[in-house]
Image (spheres, rainbow, N blue to C red):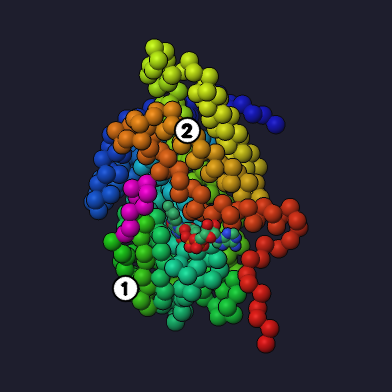
Amino acid sequence: MDFQLNDQQRELIEGTERLGRQLQAQAKEAGDAEHHGDFEPMHKLRRDMAANGLLGLNMPTEYGGMGLPLLDTLLLIQSLQKIDSTLGGLAHRTSTGAIGAILELGNQAQKDRYVTGVARGEFGVSIGITEPDAGSAATAMKTRGRIEGDDVFIRGQKIFISAAKAHKYTMLYCRFGSTGSARDIGAIVVPHDAPGFSISPGTLNMAGERQYELFFDDCKVPRENILAESNAFGKLISVYNAERLGSMARMLGSAQASFEFALQYVQERKQFGRELADFQGLQWMLAEMKVKLEAAQLMVWRAASNAMTGLPVPVETSMAKVYVAQACKEICDDAIQLLGGYGYMTEYPVEARYREVRGGSIYGGTLQIHKNMIAAHLLGRKNNQWAPKAET
Ligand SMILES: Cc1cc2nc3c(=O)[nH]c(=O)nc-3n(C[C@H](O)[C@H](O)[C@H](O)COP(=O)(O)OP(=O)(O)OC[C@H]3O[C@@H](n4cnc5c(N)ncnc54)[C@H](O)[C@@H]3O)c2cc1C
């Protein structure tokens, strides 16, 4: 067991931070433009990040990726997120995002097309799971694909889909069978120009990013786009654990940025004729923030290290998620407190960091859902939350 980052990892982080800082202003512009519905700057940023080796970090080199282990990938996502949330988001979605599932479940042609396209910055792929009536209870999804010859006709609706309007495809979870059980659930890649497909204008979330509704009105997609026709939900969720770790790396990057800003600030700001850093009450806050940050990192690193030869262990991912989301929220909240009124103002960076990490307790499975999974594991029980069937 080695808790030190090695020289190569330190160099990777330093090099990535250098590149990230060069792209920082461009990323801010791209994020602002996307906020207002202009996606061109984001496409350009995507291509520039790919040219600098910042996309597809853990994707195999044969598909245009950087071939890094999951742990190194997460370290770099965290480094980029620390600089700018748009950089962190692109690194995450093109590494630990939908293409992880395509790499795992796809055939050769699908991998050549989608994994390579995403890793090279040509386009993005969203993940479509959540529906208006199927949030935490994801297996209650109703969206269905009907196979007719060489085509699939999809009917249904998804909600809260991240980055969909900036992306060219969605990896859609939907039902193909009709048993009504989770066994019916498979996945298909849906091009956003498919007939019968449409996207809502999007709703702004607390972090200033847009979440989209996707509508499938007998949306016609070639059958060859199917990744898995049935019995895929368990496998998809196992792959999704890497996505969850990627989003935790983003939370860590935001919390680290908040912590470092506050640490500097308390050594500059004076009250009562002394530095804020001289007050023991604030020193203890700093100490607690640092302890939480280190502990959260270690949980993510453990889950990633243990996944080197395969997929992350579900219970390690869930435990990391519960701790990281909570710890990062508290670190970012404390950073606001350390800055006083300035921390609450948008001119200072810490309030935005709090808004960035807040969603982490909700997306990728809420904290309560992850606690259910941890408890089921501890008790050796099946994690079944469904209401008992009424007696007839
Ligand atoms: C920023 C953001 C990005 C997202 N991106 C995507 C995306 O790209 N693709 C996608 O498919 N989805 C995405 N989502 C959706 C996300 O996965 C869902 O919001 C999440 O799964 C919760 O579902 P819900 O919102 O319907 O809440 P609900 O399921 O209605 O839950 C409401 C509350 O009840 C609690 N609860 C529900 N069931 C239980 C239970 N059994 N035990 C204890 N508590 C319970 C929950 O924890 C929560 O506190 C995103 C969401 C956010 C906020």
Residue most extreme to the bottom: 392
In reply to whether residue 58 is colored magenta, the answer given is no
**Where in the figure is residue 23, as x and y percent of width and height?**
32, 34
**Principal SS element in the magenta part?**
loop
Q: Secondary structure at mark 2?
A: helix
Residue 216, image x and y in percent?
37, 73
Crowdedness of circle 1 by 10 Å Cα count: few (<14), some, many (20+)? some
Residue 288 picture quarter = top right
Seen at 50% across and 23% down, the residue is 282
Q: Residue at x 54, y 62 (%)?
A: 136
Residue occupying the point 37% across, 66% down: 214
The yes-or-no answer for disc 1 within 8 Å of ligand 1 is: no
> In the rendering, at what x and y percent does residue 266 appear?
42, 21
Question: Which residue is the extreme one toward the top?
Answer: 273
Left or right: residue 180 versus residue 278 is right
Precedes in sequence: disc 1 or disc 2: 1
Q: Which residue is mark 1?
A: 195
Residue 327, image x and y in percent?
A: 54, 39
Find disc 2 in the rendering and name its residue. Answer: 334
In terms of depth relative to the viewer, which is nearer, 332 or 196?
A: 332
Point out the stretch of residues depicted in magenta: 202-209
| Discs 1/2, front | 2
Can residue 199 be seen here? The reply is yes
Label ID, residue 50: none
The correct choice, above or below, for 15 with respect to 276 in the image is below
